[in-house]
Each structure stands twice: as structure tokens, then as C-alpha cells.
Amino acid sequence: MPVALAIVNEDSLFSSVHAALASAYSWEVRAPCKISSALVELRGSTVRAASVMTPLDWVGQAGLTMRLMRQVLTPAQAMLVEARYTVPAGRAMARRKALSANCVEVLHRGAMRNLPPGFRRDAVRTWCGLRPWRTDASWAEHYGRARSTIFEWRRGAGRGRRRPGVETVLDARLGAAQAVLEAVFEAAGLIP
């Protein structure tokens, strides 16, 4: 049973599941700072009700959003979301994101087992937002294949993408996780 979030206003805080997750993970690495009440008054009525939240309110909301996400999703889905949205600011967060990318590759290896392991790991790292180990041209040269083959391995082959690539598989699974979160976030009042 998911825990209810403490929403501080009646308006929806975010426009989509993507916006809620991106905000939660971005606040994970930010240092909260004070905003003066004079600045809040200067903003006036042009700002949504959610913007009167203090930085500490946003940090708390981010923690509650991530907790709700981890309660609702399976561990494989939660790892996929964490790998995609973690902001690699600083050495520790970059290591955490790299570890998440490795876990995603291991968890979703079955759907991509026809691809070479080194390329598969690199493609997952790239999908997670980390710097690739090699360029597509370098992979093509390494495996003795055409660049179009590397593109197909990364994004899928054919018009209907009959053979899904690494990004196609991960995007589909992230979409399924976001669909689960959409109903939960809507019930919690995070999204409209």
C-alpha cells in the first residue's frame, strides 16, 4: 500500500510523470538555499502556487516522490528509473549512476542477448545519460560491421522495429514504469 504524499497546495505540482521524476532527482544533488520573502512577494501573482514552496519543501517533496516511486514499482523498474533520472553531479553520484546502468544492463540482458556484451553495456550507459566508451564508428570498426548495423543494434531494425535495439527495449520498459506511476502520481495529486 503506497504512502500518501504530503502535498502542500491544491494545484498539481508537475505536468507529467517525467517532470515529477526529473525534479525529484535534480533536488537530490542541489543544496537547498533560502529564498527571501521579498523575492517571493516580487514574483507576485504570475507564479503558480507551487512556486511559493521553500527549497526545503522541494527537497522534502522530492524525497516523498522517490519513496512513492520505489514503493509502487518493481525493483527492476525502480532501477531503470533511477538509472535514467539520476543526475551525475560529483564523483559519488556519477559512480552511482554508472552502477545503476550496470544493474539495468544485467536486469534487462535477456531482451538484448543477441547483441555483443561490450556494445550492449555501452549502449545502456549511453541511454542512461553517461558518456559512451566508444563512438558508433569505433564499434563498427571493432566488430567489422557497417555503421548502419551498429545503428540497428542501438535503435532497432526495420520500419516496425521488428528487431528491437537497446534503446527501443529500455524506452518501452521505462514507458511501462511511467504508466504505472502516472495513475499513482495522479491519485496523490502530483500531476493533473
Image (spheres, helix red, strand yellow):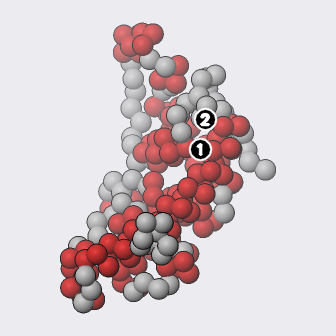
Q: Residues within 10 Å of mark 2 (few under 14, many from 20)?
A: many
> Residue 124: x and y, percent?
41, 70
What secondary structure is marked by label 2? loop
Number of marks: 2
Q: Quadrant of the C terminus?
A: top right
Q: Which residue is mark 1?
A: 65
Viewer-proximal residue, 38 or 62?
A: 62
Q: To which quarter of the image does residue 74 belong?
A: bottom right
Residue at 52% across, 24% down:
50
Q: Residues within 10 Å of mark 1 (few under 14, many from 20)?
A: many
Q: Is residue 42 above or below residue 20?
A: above
- Is residue 167 at all visible to an observer of this figure? no
Residue at 44% across, 17% down:
47
CB within 8 Å, label 2 to label 1: yes
Q: Is residue 8 above or below residue 29?
A: above
What secondary structure is marked by label 1? helix
Residue at 60% across, 23% down:
11
Callout 1, which amino acid?
Answer: Thr
> Residue 28: x and y, percent?
45, 47
Callout 2, which amino acid?
Answer: Leu
Residue 190's tag is: 2
* Mark 2 vs mark 1, CA separation in Å: 9 Å
Q: On the rendered structure, is 119 left or right of 184? A: left
> Residue 133: x and y, percent?
27, 75
Q: Residue furthest bottom?
A: 144
Q: Is residue 158 above or below residue 45?
A: below
Q: On the rendered structure, is 148 left or right of 12? A: left
